[in-house]
Amino acid sequence: ELTTPRELRFLLGRVAAELRTGAAFLGRGPEGEAYAALEALRSFGAGGAGAAAPELARRLRRAVPRRRRRELTAAAQAARAGAPLSLAAISRGAAATADRAGLVLCGDVGTALDLLRRDPDRWEGSGGGAREVAGWGPEAAIDALLAFAASAAHLELRQRLRTAVA
């Protein structure tokens, strides 16, 4: 049960970051759907050839305005030449970003860490076992958030948002 305004601000910051970055969809639905969407984007410039979801790639090509296709095709070609997609890495990065936004808005490291430790939706599966977010367990999330809390970037963001103490 949430009891303090700081807890509410932390959760609000996390949700706002997920919505702002567009990462909110990663935690929804089966993992295969997120991979299919990412592969469809990646195969955009190849005309859908080799796409895991050719229908999704075809619909994506139809939805993109003609003047933007060249830009998206160049980006897709660069993505195909790069490292393979890792939804686990994307999920970990999105979770870390959301935690950082929550901390900045909340302004209290202790509250943020306490909420991370006891977030049942994030760490407990339906079977009662640990359901770490794509291999990103509570210890790693806490370590990352502590490192961010001690950084100059954290202090600068708090000053810019006027949540800094002084």
Image: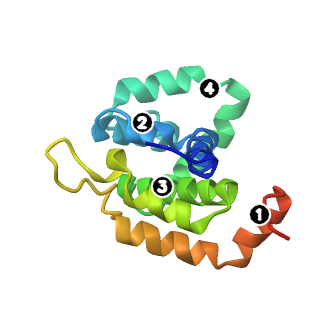
Q: Amino acid at mark 3?
A: Ala
Q: CA–CA distance between discs 2 and 3? A: 19 Å
| Label number found at residue 37 | 2
Q: Nearer the viewer, mark 3 or mark 4?
A: 3
Residue tagged 3:
95
Residues under numbered marks 2 and 4 in contact, where contact means CB atoms less than 8 Å apart: no
- Residue name at image x 77 percent, y 63 percent: 158
Label whose residue precedes the other's in the sequence (1 or 2): 2
Q: Which residue is nearer to you in this view: 30 or 6?
A: 6
| Label number found at residue 2 | none
Label whose residue precedes the other's in the sequence (2 or 3): 2
Q: Is residue 41 left or right of residue 101?
A: left
Give the quarter of the image for residue 92: bottom left
Q: Is residue 26 left or right of residue 69?
A: left
Q: CA–CA distance between discs 4 and 1? A: 35 Å
Label whose residue precedes the other's in the sequence (3 or 4): 4
Q: Amino acid at mark 4?
A: Val
Residues under numbered marks 4 and 1 in contact, where contact means CB atoms less than 8 Å apart: no
